[in-house]
Image: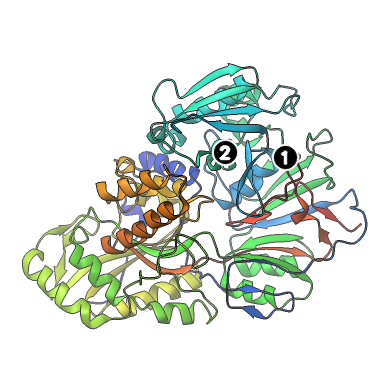
Amino acid sequence: MGTKERSTQRRRGVAFAATALSLALIAGACSSDSGTGTAGTTGDGTSDTTGGSTVDTIVEEGTPVDGGTLRYGLEADVDGLNPTTSALSAPGYVMAEAVFDTLARVAEDGSVVPYLAESFTPSADYMSWTVKLRPGIKFTDGADLNADAVIKAFTAQQTAALVGLAVRPFYPETGATEKIDDLTVQFNQLDANHYWPSALTSQLGMMPSPLWLDAAAADPTLNQKPVGTGPFMFDSRTSDNVTRFVKNPNYWNGTVHLDAVEFYPVPDPATMLDLLNNGDLDALHTTDQTTIKDLKSNADVVNMLDDTGEESFQMINSQNPPFDDIRVRQALAFATPKAKQLELIGLGEVRSADQMFTPESPYFNPDVKQDADQPDKALPLVAAYCAEKGTVINPVLNQPTCTNGKVNMEYQFVGPSAVGLRSAEIFEEGWKVAFNVTRDEVNQQDHIQQNALGQSNVLGWRQFGAIDPWADSVWLLCRTVGAISLNWPRYCDPARDTLLLDAQNTDDPAKRAEGYKALAQNMHDAYTYIFINHTLWTNSFAKNVHGTCAIKSPEGVALKCTSNGLTWLDSTWMDQ
Protein backbone atom coordinates (compact mmCIF):
# COMPACT_ATOMS: atom_id res chain seq x y z
CA MET A 1 0.00 0.00 0.00
CA GLY A 2 1.64 3.25 -1.09
CA THR A 3 2.05 6.46 0.84
CA LYS A 4 -1.00 8.69 0.94
CA GLU A 5 -1.26 12.41 1.55
CA ARG A 6 -4.26 13.95 3.29
CA SER A 7 -5.73 17.41 3.30
CA THR A 8 -6.36 19.19 6.59
CA GLN A 9 -9.73 20.32 5.26
CA ARG A 10 -11.28 17.00 6.25
CA ARG A 11 -11.26 17.95 9.94
CA ARG A 12 -14.38 18.77 11.86
CA GLY A 13 -15.40 21.52 14.25
CA VAL A 14 -13.22 24.40 13.11
CA ALA A 15 -14.49 26.88 15.68
CA PHE A 16 -14.19 24.33 18.48
CA ALA A 17 -10.74 23.39 17.27
CA ALA A 18 -9.63 27.00 17.40
CA THR A 19 -10.47 26.89 21.09
CA ALA A 20 -8.20 23.90 21.47
CA LEU A 21 -5.40 25.66 19.67
CA SER A 22 -5.31 28.57 22.04
CA LEU A 23 -5.57 26.29 25.04
CA ALA A 24 -2.78 24.11 23.76
CA LEU A 25 -0.36 26.94 23.50
CA ILE A 26 -1.09 28.85 26.68
CA ALA A 27 0.60 26.33 28.92
CA GLY A 28 3.91 26.86 27.28
CA ALA A 29 3.63 24.44 24.82
CA CYS A 30 4.30 22.34 22.17
CA SER A 31 4.46 21.80 18.52
CA SER A 32 5.79 19.47 15.90
CA ASP A 33 9.54 19.44 15.73
CA SER A 34 11.67 17.77 13.10
CA GLY A 35 14.86 19.21 14.49
CA THR A 36 17.13 17.55 16.98
CA GLY A 37 18.92 18.59 20.12
CA THR A 38 22.69 18.72 20.09
CA ALA A 39 25.55 19.05 22.43
CA GLY A 40 26.71 22.47 23.48
CA THR A 41 29.35 24.42 21.63
CA THR A 42 32.33 26.43 22.72
CA GLY A 43 33.28 29.85 21.45
CA ASP A 44 35.53 28.39 18.73
CA GLY A 45 32.69 26.35 17.25
CA THR A 46 33.90 22.96 18.45
CA SER A 47 31.43 20.52 19.95
CA ASP A 48 31.04 19.85 23.65
CA THR A 49 29.54 16.37 23.67
CA THR A 50 28.40 16.64 27.28
CA GLY A 51 25.50 18.78 26.08
CA GLY A 52 23.53 20.96 28.44
CA SER A 53 23.39 24.73 28.40
CA THR A 54 26.29 26.81 27.13
CA VAL A 55 26.98 30.40 26.18
CA ASP A 56 29.84 31.49 23.95
CA THR A 57 32.54 33.36 25.85
CA ILE A 58 31.55 37.02 26.01
CA VAL A 59 33.84 39.78 27.21
CA GLU A 60 31.70 42.61 28.55
CA GLU A 61 34.04 45.60 28.17
CA GLY A 62 33.32 49.03 29.60
CA THR A 63 30.07 50.59 30.69
CA PRO A 64 26.79 49.68 28.99
CA VAL A 65 25.79 52.12 26.27
CA ASP A 66 22.25 53.46 26.07
CA GLY A 67 20.39 53.61 22.77
CA GLY A 68 19.73 51.48 19.73
CA THR A 69 16.97 49.21 18.48
CA LEU A 70 17.43 45.45 18.75
CA ARG A 71 15.83 43.53 15.84
CA TYR A 72 14.95 39.99 16.91
CA GLY A 73 13.93 37.12 14.59
CA LEU A 74 11.32 34.67 15.90
CA GLU A 75 10.25 31.29 14.51
CA ALA A 76 6.56 32.32 14.37
CA ASP A 77 4.01 34.90 15.49
CA VAL A 78 1.23 34.44 18.06
CA ASP A 79 -2.45 35.34 18.12
CA GLY A 80 -2.14 37.95 20.85
CA LEU A 81 -0.10 39.13 23.83
CA ASN A 82 -2.60 38.94 26.68
CA PRO A 83 -1.37 36.39 29.26
CA THR A 84 -4.94 35.77 30.43
CA THR A 85 -6.32 34.91 26.98
CA SER A 86 -3.55 34.55 24.41
CA ALA A 87 -1.61 31.60 23.02
CA LEU A 88 1.99 32.00 24.14
CA SER A 89 4.40 29.53 22.58
CA ALA A 90 8.14 30.28 22.66
CA PRO A 91 7.92 33.33 20.32
CA GLY A 92 5.01 34.70 22.34
CA TYR A 93 6.94 34.27 25.55
CA VAL A 94 9.95 36.16 24.17
CA MET A 95 7.72 39.11 23.27
CA ALA A 96 5.55 38.97 26.38
CA GLU A 97 8.52 38.83 28.76
CA ALA A 98 9.66 42.20 27.39
CA VAL A 99 6.43 43.82 28.62
CA PHE A 100 5.25 41.65 31.51
CA ASP A 101 7.38 40.95 34.55
CA THR A 102 6.64 37.76 36.46
CA LEU A 103 6.16 37.33 40.19
CA ALA A 104 9.19 35.02 40.28
CA ARG A 105 12.22 34.36 38.08
CA VAL A 106 14.60 31.46 37.60
CA ALA A 107 18.10 31.98 38.95
CA GLU A 108 21.21 30.96 37.06
CA ASP A 109 21.52 27.91 39.33
CA GLY A 110 17.95 26.79 38.52
CA SER A 111 16.37 27.89 41.79
CA VAL A 112 13.26 30.07 41.86
CA VAL A 113 13.65 33.56 43.37
CA PRO A 114 11.18 36.40 44.01
CA TYR A 115 10.94 39.12 41.36
CA LEU A 116 7.78 41.24 41.41
CA ALA A 117 7.08 39.32 44.59
CA GLU A 118 9.16 40.07 47.66
CA SER A 119 8.59 36.63 49.15
CA PHE A 120 6.47 33.48 48.93
CA THR A 121 5.70 31.40 52.01
CA PRO A 122 3.97 27.98 52.21
CA SER A 123 1.39 26.83 54.71
CA ALA A 124 2.38 23.96 56.99
CA ASP A 125 0.68 21.43 54.71
CA TYR A 126 1.83 23.09 51.45
CA MET A 127 -1.77 23.37 50.26
CA SER A 128 -1.46 27.17 50.22
CA TRP A 129 1.22 29.71 49.40
CA THR A 130 1.31 33.36 50.50
CA VAL A 131 2.82 35.83 48.03
CA LYS A 132 3.97 39.23 49.29
CA LEU A 133 4.57 41.92 46.65
CA ARG A 134 7.27 44.55 46.54
CA PRO A 135 5.88 47.99 47.38
CA GLY A 136 5.76 50.95 45.00
CA ILE A 137 5.73 49.14 41.64
CA LYS A 138 3.42 50.60 38.99
CA PHE A 139 2.21 49.46 35.60
CA THR A 140 3.18 51.69 32.70
CA ASP A 141 -0.38 53.08 32.57
CA GLY A 142 -0.07 54.27 36.18
CA ALA A 143 -2.03 51.48 37.88
CA ASP A 144 -0.57 50.04 41.07
CA LEU A 145 0.78 46.51 41.34
CA ASN A 146 -1.09 45.32 44.41
CA ALA A 147 -3.03 42.34 45.72
CA ASP A 148 -6.14 43.34 43.79
CA ALA A 149 -4.16 43.38 40.52
CA VAL A 150 -2.71 39.92 41.21
CA ILE A 151 -6.11 38.45 42.07
CA LYS A 152 -7.68 40.04 39.00
CA ALA A 153 -5.03 38.53 36.72
CA PHE A 154 -5.33 35.07 38.27
CA THR A 155 -9.13 35.12 38.20
CA ALA A 156 -9.08 36.16 34.54
CA GLN A 157 -6.91 33.15 33.73
CA GLN A 158 -8.85 30.70 35.88
CA THR A 159 -12.23 31.68 34.42
CA ALA A 160 -11.10 32.08 30.81
CA ALA A 161 -12.62 29.56 28.44
CA LEU A 162 -9.23 28.77 26.94
CA VAL A 163 -6.44 29.57 29.37
CA GLY A 164 -8.52 28.31 32.26
CA LEU A 165 -8.36 24.76 30.96
CA ALA A 166 -4.73 24.67 32.09
CA VAL A 167 -5.43 26.42 35.40
CA ARG A 168 -8.69 24.96 36.72
CA PRO A 169 -7.38 21.38 37.24
CA PHE A 170 -5.09 22.64 40.02
CA TYR A 171 -7.19 25.15 41.99
CA PRO A 172 -10.58 25.10 43.75
CA GLU A 173 -13.46 26.59 41.79
CA THR A 174 -14.03 29.16 44.53
CA GLY A 175 -11.53 30.46 47.06
CA ALA A 176 -8.42 29.91 44.96
CA THR A 177 -7.10 33.30 46.07
CA GLU A 178 -7.50 35.34 49.26
CA LYS A 179 -6.46 38.96 49.82
CA ILE A 180 -4.48 39.18 53.06
CA ASP A 181 -3.60 42.87 52.75
CA ASP A 182 -2.88 45.40 49.99
CA LEU A 183 0.39 43.68 49.08
CA THR A 184 -0.28 40.06 50.07
CA VAL A 185 -2.24 37.28 48.36
CA GLN A 186 -2.78 33.68 49.45
CA PHE A 187 -3.09 31.04 46.71
CA ASN A 188 -4.97 27.85 47.63
CA GLN A 189 -4.45 24.63 45.66
CA LEU A 190 -6.16 21.29 45.22
CA ASP A 191 -2.93 19.38 45.93
CA ALA A 192 -0.01 19.87 48.29
CA ASN A 193 2.95 21.27 46.37
CA HIS A 194 6.35 22.14 47.81
CA TYR A 195 7.54 23.61 44.49
CA TRP A 196 4.59 25.79 43.50
CA PRO A 197 6.56 29.09 43.17
CA SER A 198 8.02 27.85 39.88
CA ALA A 199 4.52 28.41 38.43
CA LEU A 200 5.07 32.12 39.04
CA THR A 201 7.98 32.17 36.58
CA SER A 202 5.70 31.40 33.63
CA GLN A 203 2.48 32.73 32.11
CA LEU A 204 0.59 32.33 35.39
CA GLY A 205 3.08 34.72 37.00
CA MET A 206 2.88 37.43 34.32
CA MET A 207 1.25 40.56 35.71
CA PRO A 208 -0.91 42.61 33.30
CA SER A 209 -2.35 46.00 34.18
CA PRO A 210 -5.86 45.68 35.68
CA LEU A 211 -6.94 48.79 33.77
CA TRP A 212 -5.76 47.24 30.53
CA LEU A 213 -7.47 43.93 31.31
CA ASP A 214 -10.79 45.76 31.68
CA ALA A 215 -10.21 47.68 28.46
CA ALA A 216 -9.18 44.54 26.54
CA ALA A 217 -12.30 42.72 27.75
CA ALA A 218 -14.38 45.48 26.18
CA ASP A 219 -12.20 45.79 23.06
CA PRO A 220 -10.36 42.54 22.17
CA THR A 221 -8.12 44.35 19.68
CA LEU A 222 -6.26 45.62 22.75
CA ASN A 223 -4.99 42.07 23.31
CA GLN A 224 -2.38 43.07 20.72
CA LYS A 225 -1.30 46.12 22.79
CA PRO A 226 -0.05 44.78 26.13
CA VAL A 227 0.50 46.83 29.29
CA GLY A 228 2.69 45.54 32.11
CA THR A 229 5.44 46.56 34.52
CA GLY A 230 8.28 45.31 32.32
CA PRO A 231 11.37 46.93 30.81
CA PHE A 232 9.57 47.78 27.57
CA MET A 233 6.21 49.29 26.59
CA PHE A 234 3.99 48.64 23.58
CA ASP A 235 4.54 50.90 20.56
CA SER A 236 3.09 49.12 17.50
CA ARG A 237 2.24 45.68 16.14
CA THR A 238 1.44 44.34 12.68
CA SER A 239 0.58 40.65 12.85
CA ASP A 240 3.03 38.37 10.99
CA ASN A 241 5.26 41.37 10.26
CA VAL A 242 6.75 43.27 13.20
CA THR A 243 6.00 44.01 16.86
CA ARG A 244 7.78 47.04 18.35
CA PHE A 245 8.25 47.86 22.02
CA VAL A 246 9.99 50.97 23.36
CA LYS A 247 12.01 51.54 26.52
CA ASN A 248 10.18 51.92 29.83
CA PRO A 249 11.99 54.99 31.22
CA ASN A 250 10.64 54.34 34.72
CA TYR A 251 11.47 50.65 35.00
CA TRP A 252 11.46 49.62 38.64
CA ASN A 253 14.43 47.21 38.49
CA GLY A 254 17.24 49.27 37.02
CA THR A 255 18.09 51.05 33.80
CA VAL A 256 16.88 49.78 30.44
CA HIS A 257 19.61 50.47 27.88
CA LEU A 258 17.92 49.77 24.54
CA ASP A 259 15.68 52.45 23.04
CA ALA A 260 13.47 49.79 21.49
CA VAL A 261 13.18 46.15 20.48
CA GLU A 262 11.48 44.90 17.32
CA PHE A 263 10.35 41.30 16.87
CA TYR A 264 10.09 39.84 13.37
CA PRO A 265 8.41 36.44 12.78
CA VAL A 266 10.44 34.58 10.14
CA PRO A 267 9.15 30.98 9.83
CA ASP A 268 11.82 29.91 7.32
CA PRO A 269 15.09 29.29 9.22
CA ALA A 270 17.32 29.84 6.18
CA THR A 271 15.76 33.25 5.57
CA MET A 272 16.15 34.19 9.22
CA LEU A 273 19.83 33.20 9.13
CA ASP A 274 20.40 35.29 6.01
CA LEU A 275 18.79 38.30 7.68
CA LEU A 276 21.15 37.95 10.66
CA ASN A 277 24.22 37.48 8.47
CA ASN A 278 23.27 40.49 6.33
CA GLY A 279 22.79 42.75 9.33
CA ASP A 280 19.00 43.01 8.98
CA LEU A 281 18.53 41.22 12.32
CA ASP A 282 20.57 41.54 15.50
CA ALA A 283 19.30 38.36 17.18
CA LEU A 284 17.25 35.22 16.55
CA HIS A 285 16.10 31.97 18.10
CA THR A 286 15.72 28.63 16.35
CA THR A 287 15.76 24.85 16.75
CA ASP A 288 16.69 24.21 13.11
CA GLN A 289 19.80 22.03 13.03
CA THR A 290 21.23 23.27 9.75
CA THR A 291 20.89 26.86 10.92
CA ILE A 292 22.44 26.08 14.29
CA LYS A 293 25.39 24.33 12.66
CA ASP A 294 26.03 27.43 10.53
CA LEU A 295 25.71 29.71 13.55
CA LYS A 296 28.19 27.64 15.54
CA SER A 297 30.85 28.19 12.89
CA ASN A 298 30.22 31.95 12.62
CA ALA A 299 32.76 33.95 14.64
CA ASP A 300 30.58 37.06 14.35
CA VAL A 301 27.71 35.52 16.32
CA VAL A 302 27.32 34.79 20.04
CA ASN A 303 25.27 31.62 20.60
CA MET A 304 23.36 30.69 23.74
CA LEU A 305 22.78 26.96 23.29
CA ASP A 306 20.50 24.90 25.49
CA ASP A 307 19.22 21.34 25.09
CA THR A 308 18.19 20.81 28.71
CA GLY A 309 14.56 21.75 28.17
CA GLU A 310 12.14 20.25 25.68
CA GLU A 311 12.29 16.79 24.16
CA SER A 312 11.42 15.89 20.57
CA PHE A 313 9.41 12.70 20.14
CA GLN A 314 6.67 10.87 18.32
CA MET A 315 3.43 11.02 20.29
CA ILE A 316 0.63 8.45 20.05
CA ASN A 317 -3.08 8.98 20.72
CA SER A 318 -3.91 5.97 22.88
CA GLN A 319 -7.67 6.53 22.68
CA ASN A 320 -8.28 5.89 18.98
CA PRO A 321 -8.01 2.45 17.35
CA PRO A 322 -5.60 0.93 16.49
CA PHE A 323 -3.34 2.63 19.05
CA ASP A 324 -5.71 1.96 21.92
CA ASP A 325 -4.04 -1.47 21.86
CA ILE A 326 -0.60 -1.42 23.49
CA ARG A 327 0.70 -4.03 21.05
CA VAL A 328 0.36 -1.55 18.20
CA ARG A 329 2.06 1.20 20.20
CA GLN A 330 4.91 -1.18 21.01
CA ALA A 331 5.20 -2.21 17.38
CA LEU A 332 5.49 1.41 16.25
CA ALA A 333 8.29 2.01 18.74
CA PHE A 334 10.20 -1.09 17.63
CA ALA A 335 9.85 -0.07 13.97
CA THR A 336 10.95 3.54 14.54
CA PRO A 337 14.26 4.28 12.73
CA LYS A 338 15.61 6.43 15.53
CA ALA A 339 19.30 6.07 14.70
CA LYS A 340 18.75 7.10 11.09
CA GLN A 341 16.63 10.07 12.18
CA LEU A 342 19.36 11.26 14.53
CA GLU A 343 22.04 10.84 11.87
CA LEU A 344 20.29 12.41 8.89
CA ILE A 345 18.18 15.09 10.56
CA GLY A 346 20.40 15.60 13.59
CA LEU A 347 23.46 15.83 11.34
CA GLY A 348 25.43 13.51 13.60
CA GLU A 349 25.62 15.95 16.52
CA VAL A 350 22.51 15.06 18.47
CA ARG A 351 21.94 13.93 22.00
CA SER A 352 19.62 10.97 21.88
CA ALA A 353 16.72 10.99 24.35
CA ASP A 354 15.18 8.02 26.12
CA GLN A 355 12.92 9.99 28.48
CA MET A 356 11.82 13.50 29.47
CA PHE A 357 14.92 14.05 31.66
CA THR A 358 18.44 14.81 30.46
CA PRO A 359 21.40 12.82 31.83
CA GLU A 360 22.41 15.82 33.97
CA SER A 361 19.08 15.79 35.81
CA PRO A 362 18.83 14.17 39.25
CA TYR A 363 15.63 12.57 37.95
CA PHE A 364 17.25 10.82 34.98
CA ASN A 365 16.67 7.06 35.03
CA PRO A 366 19.64 5.29 33.38
CA ASP A 367 17.68 2.04 33.18
CA VAL A 368 15.07 3.49 30.82
CA LYS A 369 15.95 2.93 27.16
CA GLN A 370 13.71 3.95 24.30
CA ASP A 371 12.70 0.94 22.21
CA ALA A 372 13.51 1.56 18.53
CA ASP A 373 15.41 0.18 15.54
CA GLN A 374 14.13 -3.38 16.08
CA PRO A 375 11.63 -3.87 13.22
CA ASP A 376 11.62 -7.67 13.56
CA LYS A 377 9.94 -7.29 16.96
CA ALA A 378 7.14 -5.23 15.40
CA LEU A 379 5.98 -7.94 13.01
CA PRO A 380 4.46 -10.52 15.42
CA LEU A 381 2.75 -7.77 17.43
CA VAL A 382 1.07 -6.36 14.33
CA ALA A 383 0.19 -9.82 13.01
CA ALA A 384 -1.55 -10.72 16.27
CA TYR A 385 -3.42 -7.41 16.39
CA CYS A 386 -4.60 -7.56 12.79
CA ALA A 387 -5.80 -11.14 13.23
CA GLU A 388 -7.95 -10.09 16.19
CA LYS A 389 -9.00 -6.51 15.45
CA GLY A 390 -8.13 -5.78 11.83
CA THR A 391 -11.70 -4.86 10.86
CA VAL A 392 -12.19 -2.26 13.60
CA ILE A 393 -12.50 1.25 12.13
CA ASN A 394 -9.70 3.77 12.61
CA PRO A 395 -11.76 6.97 13.16
CA VAL A 396 -8.97 9.25 11.99
CA LEU A 397 -8.70 7.56 8.59
CA ASN A 398 -12.29 6.25 8.56
CA GLN A 399 -11.10 2.87 7.33
CA PRO A 400 -10.27 -0.53 8.86
CA THR A 401 -7.31 -0.65 11.19
CA CYS A 402 -5.51 -3.21 9.04
CA THR A 403 -5.01 -3.89 5.32
CA ASN A 404 -2.98 -6.79 3.94
CA GLY A 405 -1.60 -7.66 7.36
CA LYS A 406 -0.33 -4.15 8.14
CA VAL A 407 -1.77 -1.50 10.46
CA ASN A 408 -3.21 1.59 8.78
CA MET A 409 -2.13 4.83 10.49
CA GLU A 410 -1.91 8.54 9.94
CA TYR A 411 1.30 10.44 10.68
CA GLN A 412 0.91 14.18 11.10
CA PHE A 413 3.69 16.77 11.01
CA VAL A 414 4.05 20.52 10.52
CA GLY A 415 4.73 22.06 7.13
CA PRO A 416 5.42 23.24 4.62
CA SER A 417 8.98 22.32 5.56
CA ALA A 418 11.58 20.48 3.52
CA VAL A 419 13.24 19.21 6.69
CA GLY A 420 9.91 18.18 8.18
CA LEU A 421 8.98 16.28 5.04
CA ARG A 422 12.34 14.50 4.92
CA SER A 423 11.99 13.60 8.59
CA ALA A 424 8.53 12.15 7.92
CA GLU A 425 9.92 10.13 5.02
CA ILE A 426 12.63 8.65 7.25
CA PHE A 427 10.10 7.61 9.87
CA GLU A 428 7.87 6.08 7.21
CA GLU A 429 10.76 4.12 5.73
CA GLY A 430 11.14 2.36 9.06
CA TRP A 431 7.47 2.00 9.90
CA LYS A 432 6.42 0.56 6.54
CA VAL A 433 7.63 -2.90 7.56
CA ALA A 434 4.42 -3.22 9.61
CA PHE A 435 2.39 -0.07 8.91
CA ASN A 436 0.62 1.57 5.98
CA VAL A 437 1.36 5.24 6.59
CA THR A 438 -0.81 8.13 5.45
CA ARG A 439 1.07 11.40 5.83
CA ASP A 440 -0.74 14.57 6.88
CA GLU A 441 1.29 17.78 6.54
CA VAL A 442 -0.47 20.67 8.29
CA ASN A 443 0.27 24.13 9.61
CA GLN A 444 1.18 24.48 13.27
CA GLN A 445 -2.23 25.77 14.33
CA ASP A 446 -4.11 22.84 12.79
CA HIS A 447 -1.51 20.44 14.15
CA ILE A 448 -2.11 21.53 17.73
CA GLN A 449 -5.86 21.93 17.58
CA GLN A 450 -6.49 18.55 15.96
CA ASN A 451 -4.36 16.87 18.60
CA ALA A 452 -6.19 18.69 21.40
CA LEU A 453 -9.45 17.32 20.02
CA GLY A 454 -8.09 13.78 19.68
CA GLN A 455 -8.24 13.80 15.87
CA SER A 456 -4.90 12.09 15.41
CA ASN A 457 -3.01 8.79 15.43
CA VAL A 458 0.69 9.71 15.64
CA LEU A 459 2.35 13.14 15.59
CA GLY A 460 5.80 14.67 15.68
CA TRP A 461 5.89 16.76 18.86
CA ARG A 462 8.09 18.91 21.12
CA GLN A 463 7.30 19.26 24.82
CA PHE A 464 8.26 18.95 28.50
CA GLY A 465 11.27 20.79 29.92
CA ALA A 466 9.52 22.78 32.66
CA ILE A 467 11.77 24.56 35.14
CA ASP A 468 10.48 22.15 37.78
CA PRO A 469 9.09 18.81 36.58
CA TRP A 470 5.89 19.12 38.61
CA ALA A 471 4.74 21.74 36.07
CA ASP A 472 4.78 19.07 33.34
CA SER A 473 2.04 17.23 35.25
CA VAL A 474 -0.52 19.17 33.21
CA TRP A 475 0.38 16.94 30.24
CA LEU A 476 0.28 13.67 32.21
CA LEU A 477 -2.50 13.61 34.82
CA CYS A 478 -5.79 11.79 34.36
CA ARG A 479 -7.68 14.98 35.23
CA THR A 480 -6.42 16.73 32.09
CA VAL A 481 -7.94 14.18 29.72
CA GLY A 482 -11.17 15.55 28.28
CA ALA A 483 -13.04 16.54 25.15
CA ILE A 484 -10.29 19.12 24.79
CA SER A 485 -7.28 17.36 26.25
CA LEU A 486 -3.99 18.64 27.59
CA ASN A 487 -2.99 15.08 28.30
CA TRP A 488 -2.37 14.78 24.57
CA PRO A 489 -2.03 10.97 24.36
CA ARG A 490 -5.30 10.72 26.35
CA TYR A 491 -3.68 8.14 28.57
CA CYS A 492 -4.93 7.83 32.14
CA ASP A 493 -3.04 5.82 34.75
CA PRO A 494 -3.94 6.36 38.44
CA ALA A 495 -0.55 4.94 39.42
CA ARG A 496 1.13 7.67 37.37
CA ASP A 497 -1.02 10.29 39.09
CA THR A 498 0.20 9.01 42.44
CA LEU A 499 3.84 9.27 41.33
CA LEU A 500 3.32 12.84 40.12
CA LEU A 501 1.48 14.10 43.19
CA ASP A 502 3.83 12.37 45.64
CA ALA A 503 6.89 13.87 43.91
CA GLN A 504 5.60 17.41 44.41
CA ASN A 505 4.71 16.74 48.06
CA THR A 506 8.11 15.98 49.53
CA ASP A 507 11.21 17.90 50.58
CA ASP A 508 13.35 14.76 50.44
CA PRO A 509 15.53 15.00 47.29
CA ALA A 510 16.17 11.25 47.26
CA LYS A 511 12.47 10.40 47.53
CA ARG A 512 11.63 12.92 44.84
CA ALA A 513 14.29 11.55 42.51
CA GLU A 514 13.00 8.03 43.09
CA GLY A 515 9.50 9.15 42.16
CA TYR A 516 10.50 10.85 38.92
CA LYS A 517 12.72 7.94 37.93
CA ALA A 518 9.69 5.70 38.40
CA LEU A 519 7.69 8.16 36.28
CA ALA A 520 10.22 7.82 33.45
CA GLN A 521 9.78 4.04 33.56
CA ASN A 522 5.99 4.39 33.70
CA MET A 523 5.98 6.62 30.62
CA HIS A 524 8.21 4.17 28.78
CA ASP A 525 5.98 1.22 29.63
CA ALA A 526 2.84 3.00 28.38
CA TYR A 527 4.35 3.38 24.89
CA THR A 528 2.61 6.70 24.18
CA TYR A 529 5.87 8.59 23.58
CA ILE A 530 8.74 7.55 21.32
CA PHE A 531 11.57 9.82 22.47
CA ILE A 532 14.04 10.85 19.79
CA ASN A 533 16.24 13.64 21.12
CA HIS A 534 16.69 16.48 23.58
CA THR A 535 15.68 19.61 21.66
CA LEU A 536 18.42 22.15 21.11
CA TRP A 537 17.51 25.82 21.11
CA THR A 538 19.86 28.63 20.29
CA ASN A 539 19.36 32.29 21.07
CA SER A 540 21.99 33.92 18.87
CA PHE A 541 23.19 37.52 18.87
CA ALA A 542 25.39 39.69 16.67
CA LYS A 543 28.73 40.56 18.27
CA ASN A 544 27.66 44.16 18.89
CA VAL A 545 24.96 42.98 21.32
CA HIS A 546 25.99 42.71 24.97
CA GLY A 547 24.70 42.28 28.49
CA THR A 548 21.88 39.82 27.91
CA CYS A 549 23.18 37.49 30.61
CA ALA A 550 23.84 40.30 33.09
CA ILE A 551 20.26 40.26 34.40
CA LYS A 552 19.81 40.16 38.18
CA SER A 553 16.99 40.08 40.68
CA PRO A 554 16.49 43.12 42.97
CA GLU A 555 18.57 41.26 45.57
CA GLY A 556 21.41 40.87 43.06
CA VAL A 557 20.87 37.18 42.26
CA ALA A 558 22.10 36.28 38.76
CA LEU A 559 19.13 35.15 36.66
CA LYS A 560 18.89 32.54 33.93
CA CYS A 561 19.14 34.34 30.59
CA THR A 562 17.86 31.66 28.21
CA SER A 563 15.46 28.72 28.45
CA ASN A 564 13.50 26.77 25.81
CA GLY A 565 14.04 29.50 23.21
CA LEU A 566 13.25 32.34 25.60
CA THR A 567 15.58 35.16 26.47
CA TRP A 568 15.16 38.31 28.54
CA LEU A 569 16.32 41.73 27.37
CA ASP A 570 16.21 43.71 30.64
CA SER A 571 19.97 44.36 30.66
CA THR A 572 20.82 44.05 26.94
CA TRP A 573 22.78 46.85 25.25
CA MET A 574 24.36 47.46 21.86
CA ASP A 575 27.48 49.16 20.56
CA GLN A 576 26.55 52.48 18.99
- What amino acid type is highlighted by mark number 1? Ser
The quarter of the picture where the C terminus appears is bottom right
Q: Secondary structure at mark 1?
A: strand
Q: Nearer the viewer, residue 17 or 540?
A: 540
Q: Which residue is mark 2?
A: 200
In the image: residue 60, left or right of residue 225: right
**Could you tell me residue 383's position as x and y percent?**
12, 75
Residue ranking furthest to the left: 388
- What amino acid type is highlighted by mark number 2? Leu
Using the rendered image of the protein, determine whether residue 493 is visible from the camera's viewpoint: no
Q: Which residue is mark 1?
A: 236
**Could you tell me residue 54's position as x and y percent?**
66, 67
**Could you tell me residue 540's position as x and y percent?**
70, 64
Q: Nearer the viewer, residue 98 or 473?
A: 473
Instruction: Relative to 15, say whether 315 is above or below.
Output: below
**Could you tell me residue 308's position as x and y percent?**
55, 62
Q: Quadrant of residue 522?
A: bottom left
Q: Quadrant of residue 255?
A: top right
